[in-house]
Image: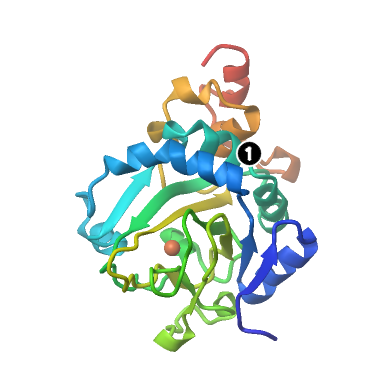
Amino acid sequence: MSETIQTLDAADPIDAIIGQLRENGAVVIEDFLDDDLLNRFNAEIGDVLDTVPEGRELSNPLHMAFFGAQTRHLSGVAGYSRIFATEVLCHPLYKAIADDILLPFCSNYRLNVAHVLDRGPGSEQQFPHRDEDVWIHLPRPHPEIQLASVIALNDFTAQNGATRVVPGSHRWDPQRIASPDELVPAEMRAGSAVVYLGSTIHGGGPNTTEDTRRRGMHLSFNVGWLRTEENNYLVNPIETVRDLPERAQELLGYRVHDASAHGGGAVGLYRSNDPLEMIRAGQL
Ligand SMILES: [Fe+2]
C-alpha cells in the first residue's frame, strides 16, 4: 500500500481519482481548474484580496494562531465571486467525488467553508490537524462526514508553503501524532487541487521564500445534517443567493436536509418549509 500522494489529471477516470483518495486519504488533481477559469477567478478575487490585511484580527486568538500572522484570509467567497459560486463550487468533479464519499451517509451535503488563504513569506508550519475535528463531539469511529480540498491559485512548492499532508493518516488511531517527516508537501501547479478526507492529517506548509506568496483556497463539504464551520447564511447575502443556480443554492445550505426516506426527519427548515422551494416560489 503506497503511503504517498498520487497526482492524477482531472480528465482521468473518476474511479481512479476516488480510489487514490480512499487509499491514501488524499489525491492531487492537476488541471482541476483550467487556465481560463483559474485566470478569471484570480482576477475576480484579486482586488478584494488586496484590501485584506495580513493577520486580520479575529475574535478567537487560537484562530489567529491557526491561520498565522502572515496570512491574508478571505472567507464568504460566494458573496464576492459569482465565478466561485457558479463554476468552482459547482465543479462536476466535486460532485462526482462528494456523491461517492458523502452521499451514503446523508440525504445531501453542503459547503462547509470556502476561504482563500494567501500565505506570505515567514508563514510557519501550520499545526497538523484533521479538518473533521471541528465536530470533535461526534464519537469515533464514524463514517466520512467531510470532503476537503485546497486549490492552488498559484504554483504550490515545498518552499512557498504547499499544503502538507500525511498520506494514510485517515486510517490511523485518532491519538497518533504525525512526526514532521511524515508530512508530505502537495507540490502542484496553479489550477491543481489536493483533495483529502476530513479524517486526513494535514496543515499549511512553512513559507521559507523571500518574496513569494502562496495563494490557495480551502473548500470543503460536509454531510447536510451537520452544522457548517462557516455560517453560510450570514456570510452570503440572500440577495446574492436568490440569483444563483439551484445547485449553488443547495450547496450553500438552502436545501433542507430531509431524511424521511430513511425513516428520519428534516433539518434546516424555514417556517416548516424547504427554503430552496420558497426562493423558487418568490417567497424568500
Ligand atoms: Fe485544515
Q: Quadrant of residue 80?
A: top left
Q: Quadrant of the N terminus?
A: bottom right
Q: Residue reaching furthest top?
A: 282
Q: Secondary structure at mark 1?
A: loop
- Answer left or right for 279 relative to 57: right
Q: Quadrant of residue 253?
A: top right
Q: Position of residue 192 (x, y in %)?
A: 58, 59
- Answer left or right for 229 relative to 147: left
> Compared with residue 223, is residue 82 higher up or lower down, i.e. above or below?
above
Q: Amino acid at mark 1?
A: Gly
Q: Is residue 119 visible?
A: yes
Q: Is residue 137 visible?
A: no
Q: What residue is shown at x 38% (from left), y 44% (from top)?
A: 75
Circle 1 residue: 265
Q: Quadrant of ligand 1?
A: bottom left
The answer to whether the beta carbon of the residue marked 1 is less than 8 Å from any atom of ligand 1 is no
> Compared with residue 20, is residue 238 higher up or lower down, i.e. above or below?
above
**How many labels were placed on the picture?**
1
Q: Quadrant of residue 47?
A: top left
User: Crowding at label 1, few (<14), some or many (≥20) Cα neighbours within 10 Å?
Assistant: few
Q: Position of residue 250 (x, y in %)?
A: 60, 34
Q: Position of residue 211 (x, y in %)?
A: 29, 64
- Answer left or right for 64 relative to 199: left
> Compared with residue 175, is residue 230 higher up or lower down, i.e. above or below?
above
Q: Quick one: 161 or 284, which is closer to the camera?
A: 161
Q: Position of residue 276 (x, y in %)?
A: 60, 25
Identify the image's colour scheme: rainbow, by chain, secondary structure or one colour: rainbow
Q: Quick one: 170 or 51, which is closer to the camera?
A: 51
